[in-house]
Amino acid sequence: MTERPQQYQFHQGDRILPFVPEEYDSRLAGLRRIMADAGVEAAVFTSMQCIAYYSGFLYCTFGRPYGLVVTATQSVTISAGIDAAQPWRRCHGDNITYTDWARDNYWRAILSVTGPGKVIGFEGDHLTLVQSAKLDHFLAPSARVDIASQCMVQRMLKSDAEVALIRHGAQVADVGGYAIREAIKVGQREIDVAMAGRDAMELEIAKRFPEAEYRDTWVWFQSGINTDGAHNPVTARALKVGDILSLNTFPMISGYYTALERTLFVREVDAASLDIWQANVAAHEFGMNLLVPGARCSDITQQINAFLEDRDLLQYRTFGYGHSFGVLSHYYGREAGLELREDIDTVLEPGMVISMEPMLTIPEGQPGAGGYREHDILVITKDGAEDITAYPYGPDFNVVG
């Protein structure tokens, strides 16, 4: 019987990446500085966000592990045979395909790049206990260093190319918002409205990025009681006159997440709801004015807290006021060091991209019941911040249907 290989290289087709090779070279140079400072000889990445950030390849795990190994001279993605040459076409650097013929060929492929006994950098916030034990068994590292937080800090500062892509994403989110606004009618189901927004964004992404891979763009469109949570899934609830609505569009372009979120009402809004809506809009505007270089996330949070407390609304706030943007989505990635929360002391710098998104949830049975949220994306500049979200917020534009 012919002996089957543990790994091989399958390179075919033209290479297509979200950014030019120089962008990835710059990111890898930054990573290698992190590695050198930490004494790391080889970094083994396992998360979607880090692999995509440093190589451009966004994997689909489907129960199989994927990786990226970076040394002082090499950058190699590790992918499963089921994907054939697609990972090579979509990555910067080299690619090794591991086979399923024997268990743990994944780790043997990684070992072929790292060699045994090295100081290994890893992602402590992603590597599972099972895979951690296998790392120790197969690579026999002389030491292990968790470099996840340093890599997150690197990702928090966007390049000009990243900001340009994020700007496209914000514009696509607006396209989805307008499509949703047009689809809102009494009797329509949440799912019907959500599909209109998603389809409009998919078509817009394909128009702007004809060589990209298209996946993961989605909409959360909630109505009535379903607006109480920011991440509540879409249902088949039918819209009624007077319903509060939450519009949330999320285009995904090459792993980069952007968002538009708006409060709306169907045809009419009662006085109690209008008061809360206008107060949340005021908090939104106040918060956006606080997003300037040199401001501290925790200080911004406390100032918005005080703003809402003065209006006896702070008790209805349910989560932080904003977060970073970049290689992330609803099921991978999070630049948790750049969030507007009481426990985050990061200072804003030019090149960071952050949202302002205050939300108030008024319980059922109280006047103005429902969830109110506005969301804009801002790029921190040397002089202040640029709002790259254009879809209007507030009652003047968003009482519809």
Image: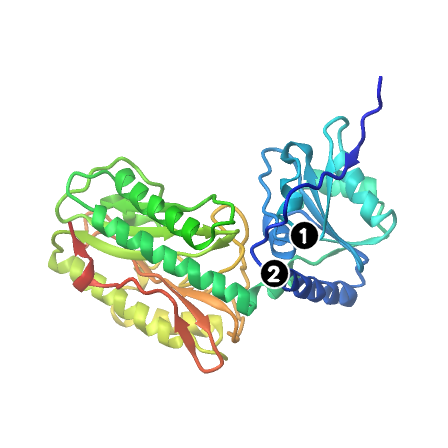
Q: Which residue sits at x=64%, y=32%?
A: 82
In the image, residue 214 sits, relative to residue 373, either above or below, namely: above
Instruction: Give the percent coordinates (x, y) of residue 108.
Output: 80, 38
**Label 2 is placed on what type of residue?**
Val
Location of residue 193 by image quarter: top left
Asked whether the beta carbons under mark 2 and mark 1 sit within 8 Å of each other, the answer is no
Question: What is the number of the mark on residue 264?
Answer: none
Q: How many marks?
A: 2
Q: Earlier in the sequence, mark 2 or mark 1?
A: 2
Q: Which residue sits at x=17%, y=64%?
A: 396
**Label 1 is placed on what type of residue?**
Glu
Residue annotated with mark 2: 20
Q: Outermost residue, top direction?
A: 1
Instruction: Give the percent coordinates (x, y) of residue 327.
Output: 54, 55
Instruction: Give the percent coordinates (x, y) of residue 234.
Output: 33, 40
Residue 12 located left or right of residue 4: left
Q: CA distance from mark 2 to mark 1?
A: 26 Å
In this orientation, does residue 205 appear?
Answer: yes
Mark 2 closeness class: few <14, some 14–19, many ≥20 residues within 10 Å: few
Secondary structure type for disc 1: loop
Instruction: Give the percent coordinates (x, y) of residue 138.
Output: 82, 40
- Residue nearest the observer in this picture, 165 or 116: 165
Viewer-side label of 2, 1: 2
Secondary structure type for disc 2: loop
Residue 305 located left or right of residue 78: left
In this orientation, does residue 323 appear?
Answer: no
In the image, residue 154 sits, relative to residue 292, either above or below, namely: above
Q: Which residue sits at x=54%, y=59%?
A: 335
- Residue nearest the observer in this picture, 308 or 389: 389
The quarter of the image holding the N terminus is top right
Question: What is the number of the mark on residue 123?
Answer: 1
